[in-house]
Amino acid sequence: MIILKTKQEIEQLRRCNQVVASVLKELKQAIKPGITTRELNDIAEQSIEAHGAIPAFKGYRGFPASLCTSINEQIVHGIPNERKLKGDDIISLDLGAKLNGFYGDAAITLPVGDIGNRAKELLKVAEGALYKGIEQAIVGNRLSDISQSIQAWVESHSFSVVRDFVGHGIGRSLHEEPQIPNFGTPVPNPRLQEGMVFALEPMVNEGSYEVKILPDGWTAVTADGKLSAHFEHTIAVTSSGPIILSEW
């Protein structure tokens, strides 16, 4: 069941997502060669708590950290450790917080230093895919309109969309119905209504969309070892169009 949110609940969700956005901006400033992903996790955790919120990922289904740090071929759910970032890396930062009973969730992929042209294009296309999906979050559209627009944009630029992980509803739970694939063709699935709140999160691979999970049980990587990028916003569907609650 898709839970519709009131205007008051959407405002609470906006406040929580602004915590997430603020922390992501802080992390962006901290990204540099030599910093470890564990140090980034510590910054995120301390900043979330300084905002009066709670890290949403820490302990969620056993995840051991407050921040997901996924480098280069890592797609999502990378666990922070002592690995130091290098100047030609890209890193995905996926962050969640809980404030006053509501959840926020967003992600961004950043260059660490001077990355190659193909990596730059991957980041541009992946971020563009997120906004293509948001554009379709209009009352009366179907969920599949979001999915199809993301896939069409990505594949028109000769990249691929990950199929093993999807977007989701969000509210008083971190993951609510519905699941929102980043691929697919139009089918008669639910129409969008005012008050729906989604976390849209296309994950885009340089090569094949196939993935594998590392022995840690969490980190998903591209099966071919090529680069991957991940962008995410929490949005609300309103009568006047989509609102990005986690706008940074």
Image: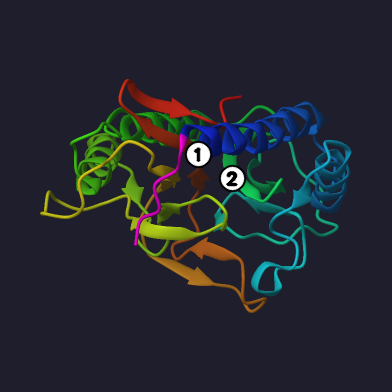
Span colored in magenta: 1-6
> What's under tag 1, amino acid-wise?
Thr
Q: Quadrant of the N terminus?
A: bottom left
Q: Is residue 210 left or right of residue 69?
A: left
In this rendering, the answer to whether 45 lies above or below 154 is below
Which residue carries the number 2 mark?
Answer: 105
Q: Residue at x 43, y 43 (%)?
A: 197
- Give the vertical position of 142 relative to 74 (above or below): above
Furthest residue in direction top, as rendered: 240
Rendered residue at 45%/35% (across/down): 235
Residue underneath mark 1:
234
Quadrant assignment, res 5:
top left
Q: Picture coordinates of residue 17 (x, y %)?
A: 62, 36
Marks 1/2 in contact by CB < 8 Å: the verdict is yes
Left or right: where 142 falls relative to 21: left
Q: Is residue 234 visible?
A: yes
Disc 1/disc 2 C-alpha distance (Å) = 6 Å
Disc 1 packing (10 Å; few <14; some 14–19; many ≥20)? many
Q: Residue 76 is drawn in which quadrant?
A: bottom right
